[in-house]
Amino acid sequence: MNNDTHLSTFARLLATENISVRHDKEAPTASFNVVDRVLTLPRWKVVDSHLYDMLVGHEVAHALWTPGDMDEESGCLAACVEIDPEHPEHVLGFLNIVEDARIERMIKNKYPGLRRDFTAGYSYLHNELDLFELSCDQSNLDKMGLADRLNIHFKLGILGLVTVSFTDEEQVFVDRMETARTWDDVMDLARDLYEKAKQEAEDRPMSPVDIDGEGGGGQGMPVDGDSPSWSRGREGAEQPQTS
């Protein structure tokens, strides 16, 4: 059994459904299309096997627990339209950050064997690839907005790879992300983070990248045609070479 076949079978077993698995050497990272039920995996050279297992685990978690309701008019997730009908695309990054924390916790609870893969996978992304662009200047972390720092905390901080600081007011958001269980919890927290970012934007200049929740290590949720794909990583960050 070749590696592609092994990963495809592994993904379907975890997802408990016959999802489609596509291996694409042009893909910058893994993603899952929640509407078409297609998991896309990149082909990278010389990558720790734990990283691929982590990518599969993360995207399968979206398959298991992330709703795929679309708003046909806007082409965005219905949840984004509900939070901001005028600019639903601005909500995507915030929703993704909160949902990633929830589904990664849930997949590790469902399949405890994946905990080692997530630890090793994120360690590789941080230490070997600097995917979150922190190693060159750790002080950049303190300059990030709340949503981005939450993203880093729940991907690297909980593993002890970095230390993320929060004020007492911000700690409330950390606690809510730690205990988010349902999609409604994700919606409520993403809405509050989005409103907080808009409020902060009134007090200081903020670029479109900031308001999208994608600056300094944030993760957007790119839209592939009319279908949403959930993906990991920061655009422009170094990726493993493709085979």
Image (spheres, grey):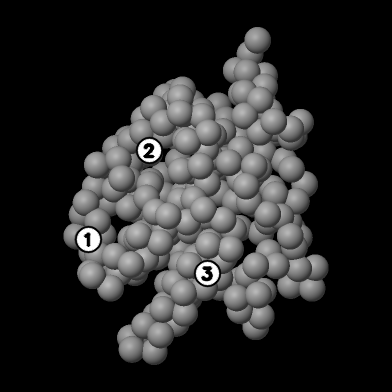
Q: Distance of mark 2 from mark 1, alpha carbons?
A: 19 Å
Q: Position of residue 50 (x, y in %)?
A: 44, 26
Q: Disc number at residue 152? A: none
- Most foreground residue, 17 or 205: 17
Q: Which of marks 2 and 1 is nearer the N terminus?
A: 2
SS at circle 2: helix
Badge 1 amino acid: Ser
The mark lying in front, picked from 2 and 3, is 3
Q: Disc number at residue 122? A: 2
Q: Distance of mark 3 from mark 1, alpha carbons?
A: 23 Å
SS at circle 3: helix
Q: Do the residues labelled 2 and 3 touch (CB within 8 Å)?
A: no
Q: Is residue 153 left or right of residue 208?
A: left
Badge 2 amino acid: Tyr
Q: Disc number at residue 165? A: 1
Residue depicted at 67% across the width and 38% down the height: 39
SS at circle 1: loop
Q: Name the residue under label 3.
A: 188
Residue depicted at 27% across the width and 51% down the height: 134
Res 25 visible? no
Q: Position of residue 57 (x, y in %)?
A: 54, 34
Q: Position of residue 183 (x, y in %)?
A: 59, 58
The mark lying in front, picked from 3 and 1, is 3
